[in-house]
Image: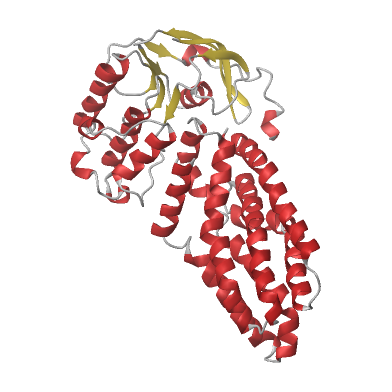
Amino acid sequence: MIALLLRDLRLAVRAGGGFGLGLAFFLIVVVLVPFGVGPETAVLTRIAPGILWVASLLAALLSLDRIFALDFEDGSLALLATSPLPLEGAALMKALAHWITTGLPLTIAAPALGFLLSLAPEAYVYLLVSLLLGTPALSMIGTFGAALTVGLRRGGLLLSLLVLPLYVPTLIFGAEAVRRGADGLDPTGALLLLGAITAGTFALLPFATAATLRINLR
Amino acid sequence: MLRVQNLTCARGGVPVLSGVSFDVAAGQALILRGPNGVGKTTLLRTLAGLQPALAGAADYPQDQGAYASHADGIKTALTVTENLAFWADVHGTILSDGIFATFDLVDLRDRMAGTLSAGQKRRLGLARLGVIGRKVLFLDEPTVSLDGFSVRLFADWLQNTHLAGGGISVIATHIDLGLAAPELDLTPFKAAPDVGGGSDEAFL
């Protein structure tokens, strides 16, 4: 299983696009917001948690369709399905590889972009923690969506429509945790729920993803 | 030992072959023949477990099957060695140096797979079969885009290494590989258009 993870990471770095694309998109969206809503720091401070979370969600969405599409086209997916590696494990590794190339860089870059949106100083630590807890769920749910649309022509658009509603709970609790942190309230509840969603997706979705892949490979 | 009994397989919910039965003993190969569209690929995919059979069964040692088609899962951004090492790793085998010589890949080891010609890529795809150490091979047109020399290289490996080591292979091909193997014409097994069982599948 580690072999698959390492291969995917190596491909993401070499083939270009995969690694920096999401991060660059995140950067641009967040930089655009002050141009759109104006430079008043009071307004920006209030909307910063939501903007940062929505932007990271969209950035994570950007590279989802590549998770299985390339492997499907060149036949690797069929070969993996007949290999000793369980497809559930492959799904998990794909999600992990997506998180390492997208979610993790987003999490690390978010505090710097929070500064651009004059995020409240108390909120930085909660921004980091909430993204660290929440972005793995985005990758896992996205991997499931990618498995649903693998083999479809122009499946990327359908993938976004399928996956975005499933991102809602993560977005609500992620942004809520940062907002409560910024207001000096206790964000523990929101963070716990965020962690629960991530744990739940990782417990269930690898199986759903593998079942979906088996059907799509027929 | 591969035993196929009364197998019915479908493509897109429509049965294409029914009542396919044959045995292949260890160390033997079977060549599938038949015109385009008769269902050679469907049969091989069903045998490899990529799609369920509508009826019947194929018995062979568990976890010994491997499938290969013209889409050979080569990553163009990885080198030849990295491609093979990945499959060796997934299958828990060790990538030996001999395989590069067997498939004439020694000079190409460190080349990016994306820079290989179609025939060289095909040789790399076939070398995967030598790496993964599976006993029962289901090969769909393995020699597409290979020149005569490479075809002999592959046939030699199949005969002298794989089959000689007790392996089995079922091969769909239109050319003569030069193997002393029985042939099976699939035309008589063509399914009648209204053989039941597939109507629901068609809507999936």
Seen at 38% across and 58% down, the residue is: A14
Above or below, B118 against B191 in this view is below
Above or below, B142 against A76 in this view is above
Residue A43 found in image quarter: bottom right
Residue A139, given in percent of the width and then of the height, sits at 61, 54
Is residue A188 or residue B184 the one in the foreground?
A188
Residue B180, given in percent of the width and then of the height, sits at 28, 11
Left or right, B98 with respect to A26, comes to left
Above or below, B82 against A9 in this view is above
Seen at 46% across and 34% down, the residue is: A79
Question: Farthest residue in the bottom direction?
Answer: A40
Seen at 52% across and 33% down, the residue is: A81
Left or right, B189 with respect to B80, comes to right
Is residue B127 or residue A186 the one in the foreground?
A186
Whether residue A151 is visible here, answered yes or no, is: no
Above or below, A10 against B14 in this view is below
Residue A167, given in percent of the width and then of the height, sits at 71, 58
Left or right, A47 with respect to B178, comes to right
Residue A80, given in percent of the width and then of the height, sits at 48, 36
